[in-house]
């Protein structure tokens, strides 16, 4: 009797397990199919841009209605025109240098500010932190004119179009952007969640603040650093208004201005060349994000158990 009861119980458990698996499988498909459809809808503009990038201008204009497949055969020709006739290689290098310099400077300054706001006491600390956060509400566009005057001939003399000045456009492209309110906020929140016992242990061992930052805080902050680096790199990579505003020499220009100027030929727009320029300019940020996406997601887990 006991054996029969055990067999019946095992059969029931097996049936229940199979039913649960079927429900989970059905639920998984019910969730994944709408998600795949939504992802395709979101990706349609990018897919269409890649498709147009493979066409000549005449084919792009005659493609009505728009289609994603089959792709054309002119992607290589469009990319070759960009690098041979539009100086895309130089602009990519310029943008990479400016973006990396700004990212490194921003991370260093933000880390030092985060340490100051968490581990030091000084008058007006909270007021200063509030003022830093207020800068998030100030768009770059409203400070373009005073910033232009500051870096121009009468003050710092960094602009290449100013005759007789100490022309250094890369300083004008980097120095105004090395401060970051969002970076200060992220590092302050991150350092606030680090146990205070580590600070006390470092003080007992006689570690200086910089040694504490380098030996303890830095190894524990790689996720936040990666998250901030991705944000700032993409932001600087997509700079358009400020470089367009201050740079007159094409050899010093940034990539987004080059994208805008790539397709202008005698007053007409070559859409195949324009889309190819957009695709090429988007590759470095995509690579950076793919390489650091795990650290990017972990970097915003601002809780003690991360």
Image (cartoon, rainbow, N blue to C red):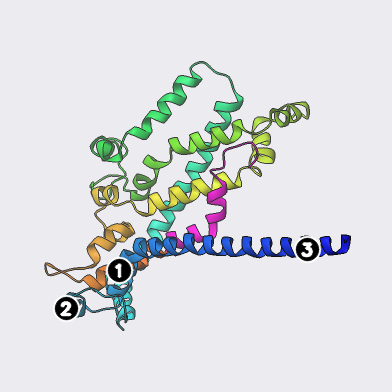
Which mark is drawn over residue 62? 2
Query: Magenta: predominant secondary structure element?
Result: helix
Q: Label 3: which residue?
A: 8
Q: Compare residues 243 and 6 and report the one nearer the observer.
A: 6
Q: Residue at x 42, y 29 (%)?
A: 132
Instruction: Give the total of numbered labels.
Output: 3
Give the x, y percent position of residue 43: 36, 64
Q: Residues within 10 Å of mark 1 (few under 14, many from 20)?
A: some
* Picture layout, residue 93 above or below residue 74: above
**Which dot marks residue 49?**
1
| Callout 2 secondary element | helix
Quadrant in which residue 53 is drawn: bottom left
Q: Is residue 295 magenta?
A: yes
Quadrant in the picture for the N terminus: bottom right
Question: Callout 1: helix, strand or loop?
Answer: helix
Residue 141 pos. (x, y %):
26, 40
Question: Marks 3/2: CA distance?
Answer: 70 Å
Residue found 35% across the figure and 60% down from its top: 42
């Amino acid at each position: 009797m006991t054996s029969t009861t055990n067999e019946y119980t095992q059969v029931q458990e097996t049936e229940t397990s199979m039913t649960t698996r079927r429900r989970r499988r059905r639920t998984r498909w019910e969730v994944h199919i709408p998600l795949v459809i939504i992802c395709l809808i979101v990706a349609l503009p990018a897919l269409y841009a890649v498709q147009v990038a493979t066409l000549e201008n005449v084919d792009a204009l005659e493609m009505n209605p728009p289609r994603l497949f089959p792709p054309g055969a002119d992607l290589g020709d469009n990319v070759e025109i960009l690098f041979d006739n539009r100086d895309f290689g130089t602009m990519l290098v310029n943008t990479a240098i400016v973006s990396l310099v700004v990212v490194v400077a921003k991370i260093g300054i933000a880390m030092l500010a985060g340490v100051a706001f968490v581990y030091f006491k000084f008058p007006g600390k909270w007021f200063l932190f509030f003022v830093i956060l207020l800068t998030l509400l100030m768009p770059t566009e409203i400070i373009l004119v005073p910033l232009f005057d500051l870096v121009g001939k009468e003050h710092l003399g960094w602009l290449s179009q100013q005759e007789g000045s100490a022309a250094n456009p890369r300083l004008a492209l980097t120095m105004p952007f090395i401060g970051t309110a969002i970076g200060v906020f992220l590092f302050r929140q991150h350092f606030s969640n680090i146990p205070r016992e580590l600070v006390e242990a470092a003080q007992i061992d006689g570690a200086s603040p910089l040694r504490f930052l380098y030996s303890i805080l830095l190894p524990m902050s790689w996720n936040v650093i990666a998250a901030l680096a991705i944000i700032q790199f993409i932001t600087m990579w997509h700079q358009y208004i400020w470089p367009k505003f201050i740079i007159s020499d094409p050899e010093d220009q940034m990539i987004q201005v080059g994208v805008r100027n790539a397709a202008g030929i005698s007053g007409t727009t070559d859409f195949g060349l324009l889309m190819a320029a957009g695709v090429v300019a988007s590759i470095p940020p995509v690579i950076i994000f793919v390489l650091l996406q795990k650290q990017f997601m972990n970097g915003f887990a601002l809780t003690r158990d991360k």
